[in-house]
Image (cartoon, helix red, strand yellow):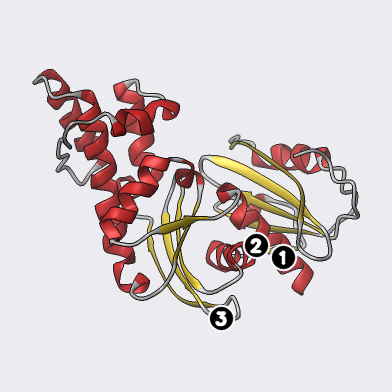
Amino acid sequence: MTAPTAPVAALGVDVGSTSCKVVAVDAAGRILAARVEPSDPRIEPQVERLLATLGAGNAPVGATGYGRKRVRAGRVLTEITCHACGAFARAGRPGVLVDMGGQDTKVIRIGPGGEVLDFAMNDKCAAGTGRFLEVILARLQVPLAEVADRVARAARSVPVSSTCTVFAESEVISLVASGEPLEGIVKGLHQALAARVAGLARGAAAGAEVFMSGGVALNAAMVSALAEALGRPIRVLPDPQLVGALGAALAVIAR
């Protein structure tokens, strides 16, 4: 997105383990401009630089994400609050949000006013997060751009049973060495991750519309695998990586 041409009412920052996202919104909560780039260990100068590129001057800042306390912001907010707020603004109605990021997976039940009714998180092990796919796909030398095509071409799914990312990496190496088709292994990886996330989401998602956000939502094969595991369609929110940052900006406006 280009620099904003309308007055900026607030800025939102979401510092994740994998990527850093910043947005500028107007008084109505519309996104005017945004930036996304891989997270730098030196978060403070990175955020300052990204915010400067938005040309928003002294607009108030809301911050969320695992690095939120290292950002100079008027408001520092939890990820659950911001993702619920951002998802409700994008969807325009209540439902259940599955946010799959690099460090954790969040399942948030959102009420009719955009409030958090309940939530669950997988933040203890990478096997239930985007990191699981990132590590193993890199080991298999399969770029993200090729994943959907690889899964579509799989004649069958090759089960990956390990529930630990480290052990799963060893398991898929053994599967490759034993002659299992790469496409089937990639499909099996997606199904294994989808099963873990579905286990986290199934109770909350009963009877509710399911939304998806986070960087993993850009992986169409993962969206399809999760929809199959849950037995219901999933709506990927617009600009899924920006949902948390949008929520942080909206919280500043609503204050």
Instruction: From the image, tell me which residue sits under label 1.
Output: 250
Q: Earlier in the sequence, mark 2 or mark 3?
A: 3
Whole-number angstrom distance, CA of label 2 to CA of label 3: 16 Å
Q: Give the x, y percent position of residue 64.
A: 62, 57
* Residue pictured at 26% horizontal, 32% vertical: 186
Q: Residues within 10 Å of mark 1 (few under 14, many from 20)?
A: many
Q: Which mark is residue 29?
A: none
Q: Is residue 230 above or below residue 92?
A: above
Q: Secondary structure at mark 2?
A: helix
Residues packed near mark 3 inside 10 Å, few (<14), some (14 to 19) or many (20 plus): few
Q: Residue 113, located in which quarter of the rendered image?
A: bottom right
**Residue that appears at 31% across and 24% down:** 139
At label 3, which amino acid type do we have? Pro
Q: Label 2: which residue?
A: 247
Q: Residue at x 57, y 78 (%)?
A: 115
Location of mark 3 (residue):
112
Tell me the quadrant of the picture where the C terminus can be found: bottom right
Q: Which quadrant holds residue 93?
A: bottom right
Where is residue 206? Give x, y as percent.
Answer: 33, 74
Label 3 and label 1: CA atoms lie apart by 17 Å
Q: Amino acid at mark 1?
A: Leu
